[in-house]
Amino acid sequence: MTFDRRSLLIATGGLLAAPALAQDFPNRPIRIVVPFPAGGTTDLLARLFAQRMTETMGQSVVVENRGGGGGSIGADVVAKAAPDGYTLLFHNITFPTTTATLTLAGRPPHDIERDFAPLSLGANVPLIVLANPSVPVADLKGFVDWAKAQPRPPFYGSTGPGSFMNMVGEVLIRDAGIRMEHVPFRGAAPLVQELIAGRVQLGGDQISTCFTHVRSGALKGLANVASRRAGVLPDVPTVRELGFPSLELEGWNGFFAPARTPAPVMARLQREIAAAARNPDFVRRCEEVGAEPVGSDSDSFGAMVRAQSAKIRDLVASVQLRPE
C-alpha cells in the first residue's frame, strides 16, 4: 500500500489532532442537550451537573432543552453535532424505548450504538406506576383485578407514544388480559396533573416527579419498576414482587457524546461527571428528588445501555408498539 503526500499529511494530522484537542479542551462553552421540556427530572439533573461542571472545568456548561418526538428530536441534534465534546446529550430510559418504537415503524431517527458514544451514567432514577386515589386498589396486581371487572376500559396515561409507560401499559394489556385505552401527554407534568384530577386512572414516570404526591396521598404508588424498592418510597413493591418480572426496567439518566468523539476528550468529560456525582452537595440535592448519583465509567454505562436496549426492542416488537 502506498500513500501520496496529501494522504500522509491527513493521516498524521489526524493523529496529532486528538491530543492537541484534548490538551486545549474545553476552550469554549459546552452544551448539554436535554430532549425534553424544562421542569422534568432529566432537566433538573442536567442543570445540577451543568452547574457543578461549570465550577470545575473553567468554562460555562449550559443546558439546552430540545423537546419533541419522545426525545428523538433533541437526540438527533446531538447525533449530527461535531464530535468534539462541546455538544452532549443527557437522556433517560425513553432513549431506547422511543428509538425502538420508531425503528419498528420504519422511521428510525438514529442508531444508539452507531451514532452515539455512551459517556457516563449520571444517576439512577427509579420508574414508578401510579394510580388515582379513587381507584380502590393497593398495588398493580390489585389494579389488574379491578380493571378486569370494569364495564368500560380504564384510561392509562403516558408521556407520549413510545414512552416507557406506553410500553408498560401495552405489556399489561397483553400479559394480564385487561382492556385499557392509552392517553398520551406531552410530558410528565400534564400526565401527573391528569392523574391527580382523576381523568386517567393509571400512569407512570420517574419517581422524582411524583414521590411527593404519593407521600401526600394525592396519588397511589402501585409498583416500582426497578429491581429493588426505592428509599424515598420504601412501601411501594417492585413489579417482580407483584408477579410482573417482564416489566422490570432500571430507570436512569445518562450522558452521551456524538460517535467518534476523541477518547481523551471523552475521558476528561467522564472524570468531570464522576467528580460532580461525588460532590456532597450534589449528592444531597439528587437524593432530595429520589435520584441516586453515579458518574460511572463509559464502558459499564455502554454495556448497560446495550443490554437494556436489546430487552426493550424485544418488548416493543412483542406488543407492536407504534409511535402514533
Image (tube, rainbow, N blue to C red):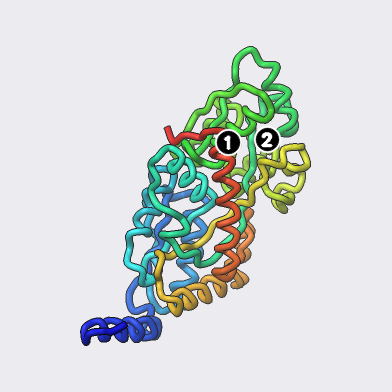
Q: Residue 240 appears in which quarter of the rendering?
A: top right
* Front residue (pair 101, 192): 101
Q: Looking at the rendering, in which quadrant would you find the N terminus?
A: bottom left
Q: For mark 1, what is the residue?
A: 318
Instruction: State yes or no: discs 1 and 2 in contact (Cβ < 8 Å).
Output: no
Q: Secondary structure at mark 2?
A: strand
Q: Is residue 216 left or right of residue 138?
A: left
Q: Residue at x 64, y 51 (%)?
A: 250
Which circle, 1 or 2, is nearer the viewer? 1
Q: CA distance from mark 1 to mark 2?
A: 29 Å
Q: For mark 2, what is the residue?
A: 220
Q: Residue at x 42, y 51 (%)?
A: 35
Q: Considering only order in the chain, which callout, 2 or 1, is on the residue closer to the N terminus?
A: 2
- Amino acid type assigned to the residue bearing label 1 in the image: Ser
Residue 190: percent from left, percent from top? 48, 36
Residue 140: percent from left, percent from top? 71, 33
Furthest toward the front, the residue is 1
Can residue 289 be seen from the camera position used here?
no
Residue 59: percent from left, percent from top? 38, 76
